[in-house]
Image (spheres, rainbow, N blue to C red):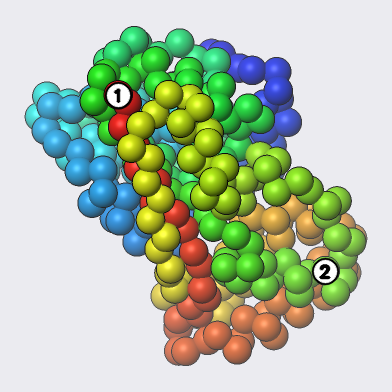
Amino acid sequence: MSLLASDDRNADQVAYWNGPAGERWRARQRDQDTLLAPIAQLLLQQAAPAAGEAVLDIGCGCGSTTIELALRVTPGGRVVGVDISAPMLERARERAPAGLAVDFVQADATAYTFEAGATDLLFSRFGVMFFAEPRKSFANIRRGLRHGARLAFACWREPRRNPWLTLPLEEAYRHVPRLPPSDPEEPGPFAFADERRVRDILEGAGFARVGLEPVDLALDIGIGRGIESALETALGVGPTSRALEGQPPELQAAAADAILAALRRYQVGNVVALPGAIWIVTATNP
Ligand SMILES: C[S@@+](CC[C@H](N)C(=O)[O-])C[C@H]1O[C@@H](n2cnc3c(N)ncnc32)[C@H](O)[C@@H]1O
């Protein structure tokens, strides 16, 4: 399998999601899907996919939402999941039930030639914050939408509202060097935290009736299995995993101990729920 289309400015993200990050997400697929299931449900409710519709799932990863969407547009509909990550798409293809109207394409959504005007719904769970030039990416994807098509995606709000990602990172920083400071608009989980920026990107790409609804969550990073599982989540995703990558084992172990101690404050039985905050973003293609 190889990347069908890519934009040079996204080369770092292509390397990242085809390297250790893609492998970690593939290995954690079940747990990630359990952790993020409430967000899939909120988005599906908002997007209201209907039988017969054609849907694009951008940054579909291991395919959980792509499959959910395909079940909802049956009969007569179809879903295309687009992603740059070979390991994650491999997992998606393994999981898709035989006969379901779903296709997975390995391509950069910024450069891929979508079938013009063919899609009723553009959907994404956390798959659109990694574009170097988001307005260009959304303008390209919009060419694949019919007039009146809907957009619904989820993205994270500011870091301070997402302790489930930032608390483990701050604990890790007691033992490993800080990641280089990054521009808040750089591709990454928090690139769409700013409401004004998201509106500008989408309106600049030609979308209309842009809406952002804030949703506050309690995310059980223990996935119902308790503190050890919470630690695995904390170490396995987001900026903490990047900060620990390549560090000496003794520093990684010290960071893990510090994270574990901090997470214990949130433990209630097998649940380790930390605050998280997202935008549910909607728009239409005029
Ligand atoms: C945080 S993961 C979310 C995966 C999946 N949507 C989920 O909810 O489990 C972000 C995904 O966006 C994909 N991605 C990043 N840049 C992309 C691009 N330019 N085109 C298509 N997919 C991209 C990554 O490979 C990754 O699978």
Above or below 117: residue 178: below
Sequence-wise, the earlier of marks 1 and 2 is 2
Evaluate whether residue 91 shows in this view: no
- The numbered mark at residue 79 is none
Q: Tell me the SS state at disc 1.
A: loop
Q: Which residue is mark 2?
A: 173
In the rendered image, residue 26, in percent from the top left (x then y), is placed at 53, 45
Q: Which residue is mark 1?
A: 286
Residue at screen point 44% across, 54% down: 279
Q: Quadrant of residue 91?
A: top left
Residue at screen point 62% across, 56% down: 237
Q: Quadrant of residue 147?
A: top left
Structural crowding at the residue carrying mark 1, measured as other residues with C-alpha within 10 Å and reported as few (<14), some (14–19) or many (≥20)? few
Q: CA distance from mark 1 to mark 2?
A: 46 Å
In the rendered image, residue 65, in percent from the top left (x then y), is placed at 34, 43
Evaluate whether residue 65 shows in this view: yes
Q: Tell me the SS state at disc 2.
A: loop
Above or below 105: residue 97: below
In the rendered image, residue 31, in percent from the top left (x then y), is placed at 46, 59
Amino acid type, callout 2:
Tyr
Residue at screen point 50% across, 27% down: 204
